[in-house]
Image (cartoon, rainbow, N blue to C red):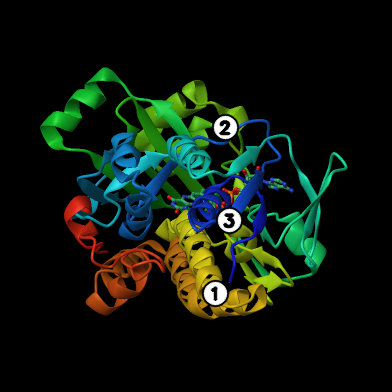
Amino acid sequence: MKAGHAEIAGAGFGGLVSAIALAERGWTVRVNERRDSLLGEGYGIAIHNNMARIFAGFGILDRVLAGGVRIDRRDSLDRTGRVVMTRKTARSPYRIDRQHIIALLAERALEAGAEIKFDAQVASADPAGAVALAGGETRKADLVIAADGINSGIREQLGLTDRRIWGRDCGARINIPRRPQEIAADDREGTVMIEAWADKRRVLYCPVTRNEFYVLLTCTRQDEGAAVSPIDPEVWARSFPFMRELFVRMRDEADWPQSHWAHFQTMRLKRWSAGRIAVLGDAAHAMPPYLAQGAGHAMMNALGLAESLREADTIEAALAQWERRERPLTEHTQLCTRIYGATMFLPAPLKKISILVEKLPWVAAQYVRAANHVPTGCDAGVNIDARMGGTISA
Ligand SMILES: Cc1cc2nc3c(=O)[nH]c(=O)nc-3n(C[C@H](O)[C@H](O)[C@H](O)COP(=O)(O)OP(=O)(O)OC[C@H]3O[C@@H](n4cnc5c(N)ncnc54)[C@H](O)[C@@H]3O)c2cc1C
């Protein structure tokens, strides 16, 4: 098929990777972003080997990794701070600030020839091939990509939602400054990711840059005293007394207005496309974040779409082939991350067992299937394991 013109809604992971991949394949591309800049929430994104392969293909892997921190060890703690399990693991070897990745992807998209337009909210999309902007402008396109995130207006307008499964849990992600002694400890003890579970609450934190911690708090929706911005340190210290100081620092030093408590959900569509509109990323397949694969799948499916468009004879055939090829793995990850997240609701002894079960080779292989996947359009011959410190393991 001849390359044409694409209008993309959303300059997140899915929209920007689509822009790069299509522009590199000869398409003219305009990304319409409703915000007035690329600045969104700042938080850590785990870089698994699947994402790393895409960055390597775009020639930006070294720059992406240079902006983050390699995690040497992952410790699971109980409510007293006792280490239940320690893993010197390559499962999530790097944590990178979202803003850093988005900035590099945007730079790469511009280099490839794409245009990025800010203050450009897509009000609706026409399956015949057009977007209408909130400002009144209508733009025709051979392909429209709805990469407009979890609350996608385009998806709703098209009536594509099959099931929206709301989880019992919600989470907030926030960065806080690190103390000089914490930075100094990296050189002595290595970088550590701490994960603690108690009372249906979970705290995960690790360095995301040399000077900042990324903290992810998770709890149930009913836990009203916990899911507030800014947090109340005493409420969280009831479950994790040994982390009281961390919670006080979060309350006092984090940029709460740019964060929010996200209600976790799994999105399943009837189809991933309608006419000339492809829906991708969280808009098509949002998932709870426990396996840290939401952005990975947004990126993989964006690249896979560009490949299908290159291979097929018509837009319709390309969209059908794309969904057939990419959807099974995406749904596998959605299921695994829901199961993993469900361990949060288990009583303490069962929770310990589930952590051990996760280590069984077959179970581990299911959890990391996406992380080790070679995305469509990536060169399987690239030795990404060597660059990333090994195959991803649970
Ligand atoms: C607590 C939490 C932790 C997570 N941790 C990880 C992790 O470690 N690793 C990982 O891979 N994933 C993680 N995720 C998931 C990840 O953040 C998402 O999967 C990812 O951001 C999806 O990318 P996207 O491009 O589809 O959507 P988004 O990143 O949401 O981007 C959508 C863009 O579209 C714009 N937009 C929306 N509507 C319009 C419109 N009408 N017109 C124009 N623009 C519009 C928005 O402003 C935004 O810029 C986490 C999620 C949560 C909630």
Q: In whole angstroms, how far apart are the C-alphas of marks 3 and 1?
A: 17 Å
**Which image quadrant: the C terminus?**
bottom left
Report x, y in % for residue 201.
47, 50
Disc 3 secondary structure class: loop
Earlier along the polypeptide chain: callout 2 or callout 1? 2
Disc 2 secondary structure class: loop
Q: Residues within 10 Å of mark 3 (few under 14, many from 20)?
A: many
Image disc number at residue 99: none
Earlier along the polypeptide chain: callout 2 or callout 3? 3
34 relative to 201 in the view: left or right: right
Q: In whole angstroms, how far apart are the C-alphas of marks 2 and 1?
A: 30 Å
CB under 8 Å between discs 2 and 3: no
Circle 1 residue: 322
Report x, y in % for residue 148.
66, 52
Disc 1 secondary structure class: helix
Circle 3 residue: 27
Q: Is residue 350 visible?
A: yes
